[in-house]
Image (cartoon, rainbow, N blue to C red):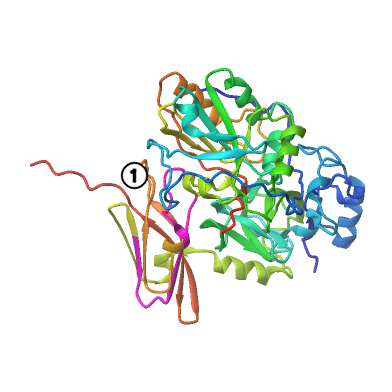
Amino acid sequence: MRSPSAGGRGTPQREEAPPMLRSSRSPCRTSTIPTAIIAVFAALLFSAPSKGQFPPGKHQDFLKPGEEESTDLVRAELLADHDAVAPGQEIRLAVALTIKKDWGVYYRNAGSTGLPTDFEITAPKGFAVGDVRWPAPERKIMPGDMLDYIYRERVLFIIPVKAAADLEPDGEATFNVNVSWLACKQACVMGGAELELTIPIVGRFDQPDRTKVYEEIAKTDASIPKPAEKLNIDIETTWEQMTLRVAVKDADELTFFPDPAKRWGIDNPVHTAHVKGDLLEMPILDRRIDRSKPISGVLRIVRGKRVDFAVIEANTARRPEVEL
Amino acid sequence: MQMIANRRGRRIATAVVMTLALAALWMPQASAQLSSSAERAQIGAKIKDFTLKDTDGKEHKLSDYTSKGKTVVLEWFNPGCPFVVRHHESEDTPMKEAYKAFKEKDVVWLAINSGAPGKQGHGVELNARKKKDWGIEYPILIDESGEVGKYFGARTTPHMYVISADSTLVYMGAIDDDPRGRSDDATNYVADALTAHLAGKDVEEPETRPYGCGVKYGS
């Protein structure tokens, strides 16, 4: 079985790096030739000096011997859960980032600092691309009561794609994802990769095989936060006097990861958005809160050994005034 | 709305590794005159006065500027942060364009480094050298206790604040809406805030999400 996956290295931070480490492109094309060979060959072929804001030779001041290359920090791959796609079928692509120990990349709400990981997805005609499914992040607390939302070690971002029912079989479908990230430990390094994946289009009655990464993609997809009602968890969310209260019966620990928002924030989330208990009480900061939209985010719920992630929303609209 | 475009075409971000500054020289600084770090600066509220020394040892007191009718821009700064590098190492960056556009208009611009000793970008000598290398015309104030930074709630470098001549905070947030530095028509929030404020109007976006490296506080 062919594996429609290939690795791509992140963009570098040092202009003096060897040419093969400089590539800002990471072509990843599936074919009958082993993927790894193609990736290495393509990296050699297409390597080009990174283009951007940081001219050569100006950053030695900040480097110390042995400091990590960005290419060592984050490795990017574009994966698929099936090795082909049939007309009318939905498959899952996944951008996998493998992150060096002690470093992290950012959630869609980066938190106090940082930058959300960003995707630009291009699919061929005849394919509908769904929203990127973000796994729940973890909290990184820093001096000054600053709090970031990050991923460590390895994370998969799921991208559902659905083939049109009238898609012409016996062709190929090429998907491109430009992913960019900010990797941080004490210091921060920007990086990105241009990923490509080509998979065959088979007949409508064919059954594409699962790839070797199917289980990893399926497991990640199953862990993506879901609306509370789908998890069958009784979550009580109330909004009163600029305070969001979230109660979960029998919970041992609750943590709230707010969605990105321009108009509101949690006051001191290091201390208020996490509790060893069954009730979170989070003061909301912004007086200019947009009351036409709910406050939303992901709730991590620990009950005994079970951990669930629920999407929650709280309606902040004032009750309509009653005319007497 | 005033728009200042990034003139340089940019693609997927390249990168720079920043490490902790090596043994940075330490220079005593004036104590910030803030009674409580628990109190935070807020949009529309009066700002507490503070005094900090710059890299030349000269004291800068906020009220010395506001009492003379100056609008003050604060820019949180760390010369080791790639976002700060991007805004200062090249010409015609949104930061430099905003500064140039308003420096003759009763606007005082001050950079502040709230990094603690031993942290990335800390040290009078390093900051003085980068000020010279990058041609920064305004002072870089040293706030190594982090007291002023915490009062303002400065989270990132850069993190921008605009304070009116009557010491009211009228803008806090990012320099622009282009964290990855690849837009050709980014909105310069600070320039927009200054334009509106100096014209006697309310700032349309008084608070935006800052982007950049975390401020390297000690505690």
| Residue B128 or residue A89, whichever sits in front | B128
User: Residue sitting at 39 percent across and 52 percent down?
Assistant: A295
User: Does residue A114 appear in the picture of this structure?
Assistant: yes
User: Residue sitting at 61 percent across and 71 percent down?
Assistant: A219
State which region is magenta.
A245-270
User: Does residue A172 appear in the picture of this structure?
Assistant: no
> In the displayed structure, does residue A50 sit left or right of residue B197?
right
Q: Is residue B144 magenta?
A: no
Q: Is residue A256 magenta?
A: yes
The quarter of the displayed image where residue A51 is located: top right
Spot occupied by residue A312 in the image (x, y as percentages of width and height): 41, 60
Q: Which residue is mark 1?
A: A291
Q: In what element is the residue under mark 1?
A: loop
The quarter of the displayed image where residue A15 is located: top right
Spot occupied by residue B158 in the image (x, y as percentages of width and height): 60, 41
| Residue B78 or residue A198, whichever sits in front | B78
| Residue B154 or residue B115, whichever sits in front | B115
Query: Dot 1: few (<14), some (14–19), or many (≥20) neighbours within 10 Å?
Result: few
In the orientation shown, which residue stands out farthest toward the left?
A324
> In the displayed structure, does residue A270 sit left or right of residue A82?
left
